[in-house]
Image (cartoon, rainbow, N blue to C red):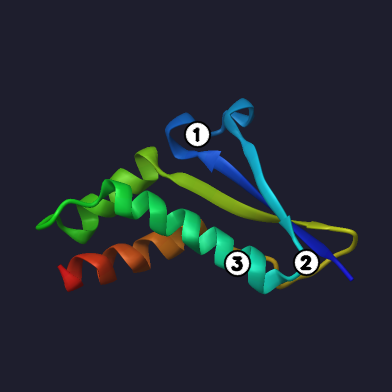
Amino acid sequence: MPRYRVMVDDNFHYMDESERYEHGTYDTMDEALAVCRAIVEQSLKHGYTPGMTAEALYEGYVAFGDDPFIVVIDGTDERAKFSAWTYAKERSEAICAAG
């Protein structure tokens, strides 16, 4: 049974693997996905100010936020795909709409 490692890149240091770190290893894909979502949520929360637009929140995320992704250990799992940028865009819209 595969295990899942969550790795995190720093959008501020785009493509700089020396800024990458391991967040943890998880037994299920659901756990790894939940952790990735929580990391993005924390970055968005940190960048949010009341009244800002979803576009501004998203732009701040892609410039400065944490960008988690999943690496499958001990096998393969085609379901192990997570786009932090796509999730951040969706959540930016929801967060700013809720105001």
Check disc 1 and give the amino acid type. Answer: Tyr
Residue 4's quadrant in the figure?
Answer: bottom right
Residue annotated with mark 2: 27
Residue at 63%, 31% (x, y): give it.
Answer: 17
- Measured in 3D between alpha carbons, the distance from the residue under mark 3 to the one under mark 1, in whole angstroms, is 22 Å
Given this view, does label 2 or label 3 mark the residue nearer the observer?
A: 2
Q: Is residue 94 left or right of residue 32?
A: left
Given this view, does label 3 or label 1 mark the residue nearer the observer?
A: 3
Residue at 48%, 60% (x, y): give it.
Answer: 38
Is residue 36 visible to the viewer in this orientation of the structure?
yes
User: What kind of element bears circle 2?
Assistant: loop
20 vs 89: above or below: above
Residue 73 coordinates in the image, percent (x, y): 84, 56
Residue 88 coordinates in the image, percent (x, y): 39, 60
Given this view, does label 2 or label 1 mark the residue nearer the observer?
A: 2
Between disc 2 and disc 1, whose residue precedes?
1
Residue 3's quadrant in the figure?
Answer: bottom right
53 vs 79: above or below: above
Q: What label sits on residue 89 in the rendered view?
A: none
Residue annotated with mark 3: 33
Check disc 2 and give the amino acid type. Answer: Asp
Residue annotated with mark 1: 14
Residue at 37%, 38% (x, y): give it.
Answer: 64
Between disc 3 and disc 1, whose residue precedes?
1
Residue 41's quadrant in the figure?
Answer: bottom left
Residue at 89%, 63% (x, y): give it.
Answer: 75
Q: Are circles 2 and 3 on residues that touch, CB within 8 Å? A: no
Q: Is residue 81 left or right of residue 54?
A: right
Residue 51 coordinates in the image, percent (x, y): 9, 58
- Measured in 3D between alpha carbons, the distance from the residue under mark 2 to the one under mark 1, in whole angstroms, is 28 Å
